[in-house]
Image: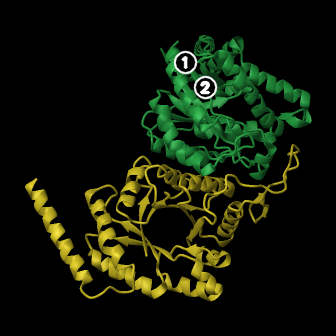
Chain colours: A green, B yellow
Amino acid sequence: MGVEMGVGLWTFQSTVTRPHQLPCLYRDFPAVARKVEQLGYAHLWLAEHRLWYDAFCPAPLLPIASAAAATTTLRLGTAMVLLPQHDPERLRSLAAAVDDAARGRLELGVGLGHRDAEFDALGLPRTGRGRRMDAGLDVLDREPRDRRPDAVWGGGMARAALERIGRHGMSALLPQTLDAEGIRRAVATITGAARAAGREPGRIGMIKDTWVDVDGEAARSWFLPRLRRHYTEEAGAWWVLDGGHGFTSPERLQGQVDRTATSAVVGSPDEVAARFGQIADAGVDTIVARVNFDFVSDRELGEQLELLAATVLKAVTA
Amino acid sequence: MRIGVTLDLATVSLADVPALAAAVEEAALDLVWLAAPSGRPEVALAAAATCAEPTRTVLIGAGTAVAEHHPLYLAEERHVADQLLGGRLVLGLRGDDEASLTEWADVLLAAAGTTPFAHRGPRHTIPAGLPQHTVNPETRVRVTPAPYALEPTLWLLGRAAPAVASAYALSPVSEEDGAPVWRHLERSLGPACRRLRRPAVRTWDPGAEDVVELARRLSAERDGWGLDTTLLRLTPPPGTAAWHAALADLAVVVRPRLQQERLPAGLEELWDAERTHQHTAGVEREVIT
């Protein structure tokens, strides 16, 4: 298959499901990044949200700077920095500084953001986020560029989002709910937009909620109920469904949770490697296995990283 | 007195900061001050974050500045950097306009608390309360994560620093004579001044000023207006042999001479004699090798 494989998502949360000492999460992160590098993964990804009880990290570029000093080859990515919530000139400068610290290993993923409260705290209307995204990308894409265009990653599955990715020659991090046919259509849209703009299309990536166990059934029975609980809280409190937050639309919330659980890749090493192979065959060249969740303990995470590296990573990158 | 060393991020690559900060810690000095390049204040906290693993004890100062963008970004990044550094972050905020520096200091202090807050300032309203935000709107916000330190350090620089320092009982960093500023602060704050550190940025050119003379210069400021934390701008380029030698001089010559009001007669002579001997032995070793 020959795809690249990384792991995610580091968010530095202390949730009801698993209260954490935040100083330990931050202090230990450079060592975790070093372990991920030693295990052979290509990259490690962090996410951004702000102003939430669980202390979700609002500034992932700073832990990336700390990990940069502890690693030499591992690429360090954001999935995603919420570009419309940022001053793009400031973000461009900060990303350039962190890329300098990482000697060119920063992968800057940018997304839209969706919480009203986050936009409101910063005095920005959420309704203008698409225009702010376009304006922000123009700043990041401005000459002289600080990095290769394909080291900037965009998300989304709407046609406008995919065309935006192609137009800027960016790489894509596609939603994990896309099936093989959806991936092929997205790749075609991105490639067409890139060619029309006279740009080379970037890489095609996908983040997949992933859990592997030598006993595939044990992986499913342990992971899936916890994943459903995780997304019930996140989507219930944050996602906008029918004009309100998720808990106000229980049936739609249930549907969203079902979709995310169904699209997770869970099972034995052979099963997970086969699913990743199907994704790669559809056109994805960069797979990010999301194995770090609030419900996963440090010990479980360490063991999962090792098992995944010893089995699936070897198979998909062979 | 605490002794720190400044690194100018306009000339030092962030990739080199971790090793330089580790060298300052290894020299047993107290603080590394990372001064942001002009027009790029956000670089200072990114540089501070790179020091999280290579250092364990040295204080890390990030010299940033008021800017055109929203102050919440700085508040959030300050807290994350302080978590990464286990409470060792000292934030420097530069501002020449009193209204702007006041607003930013106000937001940073409110954000560092662990309760939701609202801010109504001349430039920013937090939260903004925009009418189109209808899904779970909030009237106060809580900046997370909290900083590691209970009372994270905030120092002020620039022309507006003395006035804002007086209003909020914060430390101004003296870049010139500290005496008039601290006379004013003592008058306005009274005993609350006891809580404040008295930092200053000073330059040292080892080629032009003997290290013992530097110690005397700083000692005079200590006894004059109370200088207690010196951030030294060293003229040798960071990382060079001359820069490392300057660190060693600060550690073994300047620092011990500044810790007490005076030293017993004969002690400085002993130190000087040992230093001369060590220097001579070092030169001989270099010649032999």
Residue A252: percent from left, percent from top: 88, 27
In this rendering, the answer to whether B39 lies above or below A108 is below
Camera-nearest label, 2 or 1:
1
Judge the density around disc 1: few (<14), some (14-19), many (≥20) Cα neighbours within 10 Å: many
Residue sitting at x 54%, y 23%: A307
Marks 2 and 1, the one that precedes in the sequence: 2
The image quadrant where one finds the N terminus of chain B is: bottom left
Residue sitting at x 26%, y 75%: B210
Label 2, label 1: how far apart the Cα atoms are? 10 Å
- The answer to the question of whether label 2 and label 1 lie on touching residues, with beta carbons closer than 8 A, is yes
Q: Chain of mark 2?
A: A
Number of labelled discs? 2
Residue type pointed to by label 2: Ala
In this rendering, the answer to whether B281 lies above or below B289 is below
Residue type pointed to by label 1: Val
Q: Is residue A96 at least partly visible in the picture? A: no
Residue under label 2:
A289
Do the residues indicated by labels 2 and 1 lie within the same chain of the protein? yes
Residue under label 1:
A312
Of helix, strand and loop, which one carries label 2? Answer: strand
In this rendering, the answer to whether A3 lies above or below A225 is above
Q: Quadrant of residue A228?
A: top right
Q: Is residue A68 at least partly visible in the picture? A: yes
**Left or right of A121: which side holds A90?**
left
